[in-house]
């Protein structure tokens, strides 16, 4: 059975869910947040150590301002209302991406990271304003600047995921099969599960089914 340490998720389909079941894309984001909470709880039950969630990409800035504002408000309220609970559950919150949001959100994110820094049951890496190509270029620049020898080990020490083991698998909901500039380096050998359901419809049972499937896969890493 394959050991499981780190799961990465592209939470796709909120907008479509909102338009299908409610009156707006934003309603889909709100429903998507409920799924986030369910999957966090189940990750702890499954003894997963790292959960990386793609919440906002560098490309998502192209969306209408109203939707962007709604998403960040949702995140702000989530942190204000839930950080104590996450802390009690021994969850560490870590942001990957560039924190260039409003002063209030930047501060809230930094405080939440600081408060939960020493927790160790589950580390949530929330990818916000994250883009993998930017991260890779940035690492190369830093490696050059420090005159480091170019090798995998030196390159990885400048990634935003330094000290985090690579994900064993990636889930993408929403019936779309692409990586969308997410963890391109880190997912080199990950198993990938594409799910038809939209993110707000994804639930613990779906998650457990994928974990069981993953554990049985024969992973070769280029070998035979
Ligand atoms: C992709 O669906 C989802 C996002 C860009 C945002 C993800 C946000 C959440 C799951 C809720 C908020 C989470 C936190 C932690 C506050 P989409 O909007 O691209 O869906 P579509 O493909 O149907 O348009």
Image (cartoon, grey):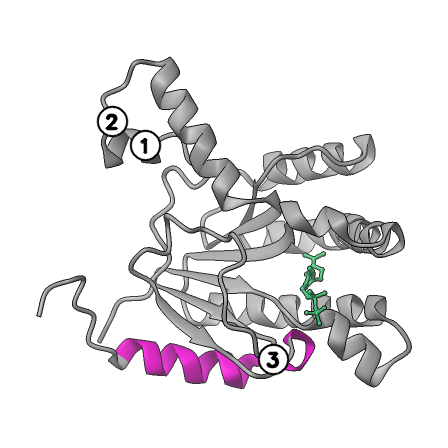
Image coordinates for residue 51, horizontal then vertical, percent: 49, 58
Q: Quadrant of residue 217?
A: bottom left
Q: Tell me if the residue at label 3 has its CB under 8 Å from ligand 1.
A: no
Viewer-side label of 2, 3? 2
| Residue 150 left/right relative to 84 | left
Whole-angstrom CA distance, mark 2 to mark 1, is: 7 Å
Q: Is residue 66 above or below residue 139?
A: below
| Residue 220 left/right relative to 135 | left
Give the class, few, some or many, for how many residues have Cα within 10 Å of label 2's Cα (few <14, many ≥20): few
Q: Are marks 2 and 1 in contact (CB under 8 Å)?
A: yes
Question: Could you tell me which residue is drawn at 35 percent across and 82 percent down?
Answer: 212
Q: Are marks 1 and 3 in contact (CB under 8 Å)?
A: no
**What residue does disc 1 label?**
155
Give the class, few, some or many, for how many residues have Cα within 10 Å of label 1's Cα (few <14, many ≥20): many
Whole-angstrom CA distance, mark 1 to mark 3, is: 35 Å
Question: Could you tell me which residue is drawn at 82 percent across and 84 percent down?
Answer: 21
SS type, badge 2: loop
Give the class, few, some or many, for how many residues have Cα within 10 Å of label 3's Cα (few <14, many ≥20): many
**What residue does disc 3 label?**
202
**What residue does disc 2 label?**
150
Where's the C terminus, which quadrant? bottom left
Residue extent of the magenta highlight = 199-215
């Amino acid at each position: 059975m394959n050991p499981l340490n780190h799961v990465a998720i592209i939470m796709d389909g909120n907008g479509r869910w909102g338009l299908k079941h409610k009156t707006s894309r934003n309603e889909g984001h709100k429903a998507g947040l409920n799924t986030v909470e369910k999957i966090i709880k189940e990750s702890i039950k499954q003894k997963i150590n790292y959960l990386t969630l793609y919440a906002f990409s560098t490309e998502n800035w192209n969306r209408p301002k109203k939707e962007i504002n709604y998403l960040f408000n949702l995140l702000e309220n989530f942190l204000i209302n839930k950080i104590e609970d996450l802390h009690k559950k021994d969850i560490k919150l870590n942001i990957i991406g560039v924190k260039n949001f409003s002063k209030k959100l930047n501060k809230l994110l930094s405080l939440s990271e600081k408060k939960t820094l020493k927790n160790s049951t589950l580390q949530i890496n929330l990818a916000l304003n994250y883009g993998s190509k930017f991260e890779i270029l940035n690492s190369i620049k830093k490696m050059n600047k420090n005159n480091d020898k170019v090798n995998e080990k030196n390159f990885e020490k400048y990634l935003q995921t330094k000290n985090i083991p690579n994900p064993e698998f990636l889930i993408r909901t929403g019936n779309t099969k692409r990586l969308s500039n997410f963890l391109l380096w880190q997912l080199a050998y990950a198993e990938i599960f594409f799910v038809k359901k939209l993110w707000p419809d994804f639930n613990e049972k779906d998650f457990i089914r994928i974990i069981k499937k993953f554990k049985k896969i024969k992973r070769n890493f280029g070998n035979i």
